[in-house]
């Protein structure tokens, strides 16, 4: 999770979905509260610090389902894992795997075009282009 402390001239605006669930936060300048956001973050939002926490009553953020804690140390302990399986990343790629398969594909195409350049000019009507068939399995 990202823990960010707002600057003196920054304020936040909670972003809600159609069902009223908080799905992110926008940070904007207090000098221009109706202007564009300085930055935004999507996901679970937790507020911390003396301006967000008031132990005597439920704040508007808490009423919207946003966890409000006393300090930044407590904010680090807030559970922010993704509940929706559809929102989780399906797969991540390692750079070494991408590089390896890029080299395999490059070698395959070089070999395919070399064979095509050697055998294609002498191909007669009715001949079987075996070099094309040999590489059909790589494309699937």
Image (spheres, rainbow, N blue to C red):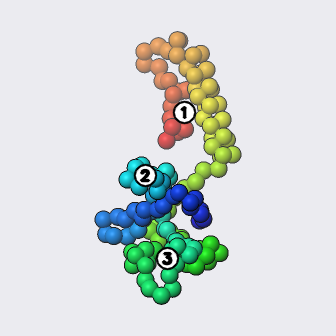
Tell me if I can see residue 56 in this picture.
yes
As drawn, the residue found furthest toward the top would be: 121
Residue pictured at 37% horizontal, 53% vertical: 34
Q: Is residue 62 left or right of residue 48?
A: left
Pinpoint residue 116: horizontal percent, then vertical percent: 55, 20
- Given residues 54 and 131, the one toward you in this image is 54
> Residues under labels 2 and 3: Cα distance?
27 Å
Measure the alpha-carbon separation of dots 2 and 1: 61 Å
- Between 127 and 50, the residue placed more toward the observer is 50
Q: Which residue is mark 3?
A: 67
Q: Are marks 2 and 1 in contact (CB under 8 Å)?
A: no
Between discs 2 and 1, the one toward the N terminus: 2
**Residue density around tag 3, few if under 14, some if 14–19, many if 20 or more, within 10 Å:** some
Q: Classify residue 104 by image quadrant.
A: top right
Q: Residue at x 60, y 35 (%)?
A: 105
Which residue is labeled 2 in the image? 32
Is 36 placed above or below 112 here? below
Q: Which residue is mark 1?
A: 135
In front: label 2 or label 1: 2
């Amino acid at each position: 999770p990202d823990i960010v402390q707002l600057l003196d001239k920054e304020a936040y605006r909670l972003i809600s979905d159609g069902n009223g669930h908080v799905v992110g936060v926008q940070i904007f300048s207090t000098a221009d509260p109706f202007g564009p956001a300085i930055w935004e973050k999507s996901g679970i939002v937790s507020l911390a610090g003396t301006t967000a926490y008031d132990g005597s009553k439920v704040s508007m953020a808490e009423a919207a389902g946003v966890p409000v804690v006393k300090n930044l140390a407590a904010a680090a302990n807030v559970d922010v894992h993704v509940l929706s399986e559809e929102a989780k990343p399906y797969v991540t790629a390692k750079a070494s795997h991408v590089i390896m398969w890029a080299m395999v594909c490059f070698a395959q195409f070089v070999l395919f075009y070399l064979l095509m350049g050697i055998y294609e000019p002498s191909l007669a009507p009715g001949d079987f282009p075996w070099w094309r068939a040999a590489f059909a399995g790589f494309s699937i």
